[in-house]
Amino acid sequence: MASDDGRDEGGSRSSFDLVKKLISAGVGAAFMTEESIRAYLGELKLPKDVLGTLLQGAQKSKDELMDRVGNEIIKIVQKIDFVHEASRFVEEHKFRITAEVDVVKKDRKNSQVETPL
């Protein structure tokens, strides 16, 4: 029987805590690097093949998430009528252009052009 602190009667981590940690690593894997995931799961002392499988699953999940986010952004951008938005912007704003021009006297020593012989 597990106590309130997540340990069973023998004092070792309960399987519930192990599953909880694996699930939280899976959810957070989309925002973590492979090294971060290795470090996070490293204290569980998992076999290398299990760790490799988890890392592959995390990478696959990350790729799927990025594909979905990218596709959603593309859908949103495709709905924007840029010509209409630019026209509306120009109609609702006025443009002010300012310039500053300085006229500076040349230094005669440095400004003489040498003519070739």
Image (tube, rainbow, N blue to C red):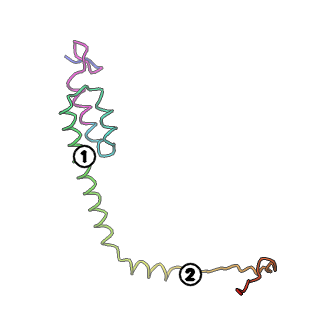
Residue 65 in the magenta stretch? The answer is no
Q: Residue at x 30, y 41 (%)?
A: 34
Q: Residue at x 30, y 37 (%)?
A: 37
Q: Nearer the viewer, residue 28 or 51?
A: 51
Residue neighbourhood size for the residue with mark 2, other residues' Cα within 10 Å, grouped as few (<14), some (14–19), many (≥20): few
The quadrant where residue 28 appears = top left
Residue flagged by tag 2: what amino acid is it? Lys
Spatial separation of the CA atoms under disc 1 and disc 2: 50 Å
Which stretch did the figure color magenta?
5-23
In the drawing, does residue 49 fall left or right of residue 78? left
Q: Nearer the viewer, residue 61 or 5?
A: 61
In the drawing, does residue 75 fall left or right of residue 89? left
Secondary structure beneath label 1: helix
Secondary structure beneath label 2: loop
Where residue 45 sits: x, y (%)? 25, 25
> Is 102 situated above or below 63?
below
Residue hosting label 2: 94
> Is 14 situated above or below 89?
above
Q: Nearer the viewer, residue 58 or 6?
A: 58
